[in-house]
Image (cartoon, rainbow, N blue to C red):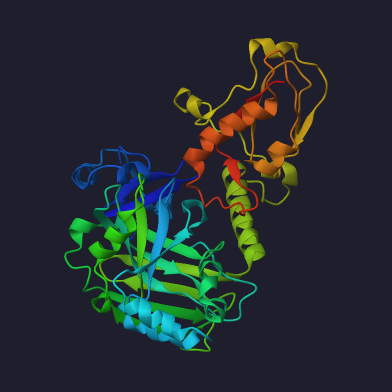
Amino acid sequence: MRLVRFRVGRGEPRSGVLDDPSADATKSAVITGLAVLALPDLLGLPLGRIREICQNPGDQTVPARHAALLAPVSGRTEVWAAGVTYERSLAARMAESEHSADIYDRVYAAERPELFFKSAAWRVCGPGAPVSVRADSSIDIPEPELAVVLNYAGEVAGYTICNDMSSRSIEGENPLYLPQAKIYLGGCAVGPWIRPAWEVPDPYALTIEMTITRGDAVAWQGTSSTSGLRRRIDELAAYLFREDDFPAGVVLSTGTSLVPDLPFTLQAGDEIRIKISEIGELVNPVVRGKAAVAAAVHADASDKLTKDSHPTSSAAGSKVSARQRLRPRPDPAVTSRSCRNRMILAWRDRARQAPRRRHTMPDADHGTWSSRGGKPRSYPLIWCDRHARTGPAVSGRTGRSVRSHVLEAADDAGRKLSSRPSFGLPPEIVTRVCLEESVRVRP
């Protein structure tokens, strides 16, 4: 059994159970949707209840070939990591440090482990998504790690794979630069799914393999085992929950035992393949810098949007314009009664007396909308803080602007949509409403 987070077409991300990942995904693999739609909701339950839901998921199934796997982290679930938990990690950190090598030796032998925040859910890369090396770093490596999935009470609910991308040159210059070396866009990948804890009898007897491919050749590869983990998993979890709270669960990466020797560094175009026995395999391509990550996710989003909205637009002789290809057709699921809680009516009876001026609002790729006309218009938007600040401020007797109504809806939808890193707008554009959401506006 594998717990997965997936999306079918342009639908909403869902959680489900993949019955047999070893089967040919194009033929027989099936995903059964869970009654709990989001993984954070699942991790907010006791372990016994989680097991019951997973073993009796329901009857709605989706062929795996129709689903795209996403990072099994969403919503308010965070990713944390432990450092210097293997002897190999100790040796590598001491070798790269220019002035403070002894600090890692003291951490390795200390009673208190090194724990640090790694990533928010929206920044986590899923299987197949690009990971990044910093543009201002000269030596960068992946760190393959067994990650523990903990529920709200700190109980081990499952295991997954984490690629803890790291800049050795930045951290080696000064240990206090660790947040810059570890926490950045494209710096964390998790997936491809979660293996339930009750199906992994001994997490200290798992084989970890990593292969880095450059072109058609293997640039680096290595094998290790979780048997070398110095800290026990329950010990790491206890320290993490000692003075902190995770109501939506947390993913705790347990440290690395595979570190390429200096001066090896990742390059753009490399492929990282991490495999942990009894868990699965996580594969990610490598790009360099924030701009490359943004370009990659935008290209992927535009490609999916064009294919989903206008399947024949690329055919020879098509008269569909580029703007029309980027503008999605209305999705019936968005305007259905069950989805009304994710929509906002930014007009009220009293707002009808608002000034009848023409107002336009820029959005990401879809042109502008206008207040001219008598009927409310339903318009799919990629809404973000930047656009909200530049939007119109038309208000009626309610004393509230259209912008305030939209931001109210965005805040509500954002809590549900923050788990969509696969859609992938860059961090400087904080996505509030994705393409699946629709906003009705009448100034």
Q: Is residue 175 left or right of residue 102?
A: right
Q: Horizontal and vertical percent for residue 387?
A: 71, 40
Q: Is residue 29 visible?
A: no
- Residue that sits furthest to the right in the current view: 357
* Left or right of 46 in this view: 173: right
Apparent side of residue 72 relative to residue 138 in the rendered image (left or right):
left
Residue placed most toward the observer, 295 or 319:
295
Q: Quadrant of the C terminus?
A: top right
Quarter of the figure with residue 373: top right
Q: Position of residue 303 (x, y in %)?
A: 61, 53
Asked where in the image residue 364 lies, by quadrant, the reply is top right
The quadrant in which the N terminus is found is: bottom left
Number of marks present in the image shown: 0
- Above/below status of 439 relative to 65: above
Image-quadrant location for residue 355:
top right
Question: Residue visible at 31% across and 79% down?
Answer: 109
Residue depicted at 73% across the width and 48% down the height: 317
Please give left or right for residue 51 compared with residue 79 in the image.
left
Q: Is residue 74 shown to the viewer in this render?
A: yes
Relative image position of residue 196 (x, y in whole percent)? 24, 56
Instruction: Residue 403 in the image: state x and y as whole percent.
Output: 68, 29
Residue at (23, 77) in percent of width and height: 227
Question: Which residue is outermost to the left?
Answer: 201
